[in-house]
Image (tube, coloured by chain):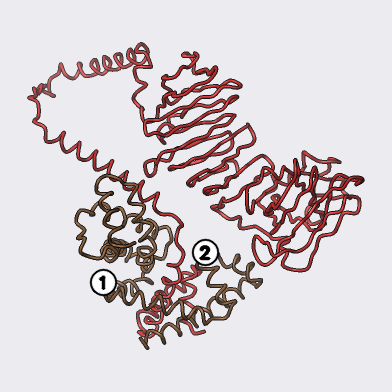
Chain colours: A brown, B red
Amino acid sequence: MDTQELQSTIDRVKAGDIEAFTVIVNAYQADVWRTVAFAMRNFQATEDLVQQAFVNAYLKLDRFDPSRDFGPWLRTIARNLVKEELRRQSRKSRHMEAYWQDWETNMNDIQTADQHEAALNSALSDCRAKLSEPAQKALELRYEHAMNFEELARHLGRTTAGARQLLQRARLLLRACIEERMAQA
Amino acid sequence: MNRIEELTFKFLDDVLTDAESSELENLLARDTASARFHVSLLEQEALLRSDRQPADLALPIVQRIQEEIRMRGEKGVMQKIRELPRPRQRIWSIPRSSARWFWLSPAMAALVLWAALVLYYFVPKHLNRDAGSALSATIVNLNGQVILESAPNQRTLRVGDSLTPGDSVTVGSGCALTLAYRDQTTVEFSGNTAFALATSGKEQEEGKVVRLTQGRLAATVAPQPIGQPMIFLTPRTEARVLGTRLLLAATADTTRLDVTEGRVKFTRMDAPVSWEVSTGGYVLTGTETTRSANAHRSSQDESLRVIEDHEGPLTWRQQPECAPLAFELSPVAQSGKNGLRIVYEPKAGDRWTYGEIDHTFTLKPGEHVLQFFINVEHYEGNANWTIQFRQRDRNCWMIAGGLLSDLGKGWNLIELEIPHTPANVWGGGTYRPNEIQELLFGVCQGAATFTIDDLAVSGGEQP
């Protein structure tokens, strides 16, 4: 979405055309989703926070400075919501604590956080492409189609234990590859 | 694989036991390298998961904004009310210690109760009808005779009349009625239809409720407040709608929901099974069959057992006493690489007017639902699909089927109840589990080409 189109959409929304906000949602949904999904493990919680981020953005639209970039402004709103949510949840999940601390430290500098996210995404897509075909398929079924291990096993023509093993190997290989790529970067 | 890898994967896959959870916690607390590895895997997991996104968030977000605006408006009104200058008040002071007050208070309570009873019995009910005006609907179009059945107000309805929760209506044969709610939601009822607006107090609390006893309706539902969907009930199902266009048809036993636009949560209340039906999708439920397309089952049956997914060699045989069916493994598949493509072309002079192929399997104890996917390429006239279960030696045959023209585009999921004692049966026996069954798939009444895939059975207690 170019700046002119964005500005005219914002103007329509400000004039009371709430439906026009769907254009903004459709243009930025993927970015905001990634930002939130980085911290939240649960799909429903992610969806809820993404929706709330857009609602907050709508309510604060008067405060948006048109000379600035809209995407980072929107993602900052999402990150602030996530921070609040993590504070609420921090006592519940001790295993996530270290990760969330890491995430929050990264988020202190939004520009660096954006660069880090972009570098990780690019490393992920390169590294995925290097995996064997069954490993790529297993990742796709597990993460894009949200299959459980029984469904995964059925689709891959393996036992449940075999499917889990394949996925674990794939994730370990992926991690090694991503670490290497990030170190080079 | 080392211990931290093993525990982290178990945590990510939600299979960590309590003991393992404590072990992981200790490991993370005392070993920095383990903690680093754990964090890096969680980051990778987040990256992988972030690829999966809902297709359309715009509608729920706009609904949430509208709700927020409404709430803010209400809060604003309350603030204005609070800021208004307060009227002068006179406070009656009654000494509580007074002996006279002790006797007066029960008398006053009785007086209030008497007044309430008088109001309840003697004030005409229609004076209260506007109380739930958001739940009331106005007749904006009417054709033929439409009767308000609610006693004691039974009468013929006219354009401009208002229906309120509790009202029940019959739309006569060849007649039609359109209702409009205050939020622009419209519901059109066809002839031979009986319906009621929210009947019980609980239903009235839930928001707009239309109870379709029988017949057909088409609805265009405006975005509803978050947490308060419009509800359509039929004798056996419930559809919850936040904003969409849909068609609903019901009899005492069957319900068909077609979603023209948007998404609807549809529930079979006797099962209970839910579907999320999206644009272009439908679900048809009956006592013995359920058909659906573009409808995502919200809970997958854990006991689902695939009996034929067509990924191995061809397992079907031609039934010799029928007209020939051409069948082969095909790359058109619901899942995996293959489905089974069936072509039926009746010819003049065929001895039999149907074609069948068969397959054997063993029903396990408790399994009583068969499901399969079907994708129709082409059909003529009233071509039907049919399915039979046979236990020849027990003289127990059941047959079910339907018109191919009733199916939607793409893959349709069909679910069939296998009753313990089938009603539609030749012979009258009962199925016995752990014995070989024959499954016959057939076509009749016209030429047809379609693919079937992923036949499975699922269980629970035998009904």
Q: Is B342 placed left or right of A37 in the picture?
A: right
Q: Helix, strand or loop at disc 1?
A: helix
For disc 1, the chain is A
Quadrant location of residue A50?
Answer: bottom left
Q: Of B196 and A132, which appears nearest the observer?
A: A132
Q: Of B321 and B41, which appears nearest the observer?
A: B321
Q: Are marks 2 and 1 on the same chain?
A: yes
According to the picture, the residue beneath numbered tag 1 turns out to be A110
Q: Is B427 placed left or right of A174 in the picture?
A: right
Q: Is B232 placed left or right of B72 in the picture?
A: right
Quadrant location of residue A82?
Answer: bottom left
In this rendering, the answer to whether B358 lies above or below B99 is below
For disc 2, the chain is A
In this rendering, the answer to whether A136 lies above or below B341 is below
Quadrant location of residue B26?
Answer: bottom left
Amino acid type of the residue tagged 2 in the rendering:
Ala
Residue at 43% over, 40% down: B229
According to the picture, the residue beneath numbered tag 2 turns out to be A146
**Tag nearer the camera, 2 or 1:** 1
In this rendering, the answer to whether B406 lies above or below A139 is above
Q: For the image shown, how many numbered marks are present on the structure?
A: 2
Quarter the C terminus of chain B occupies: top right
Residue at 46% over, 76% down: A125
Q: Is B56 placed left or right of B70 in the picture?
A: right
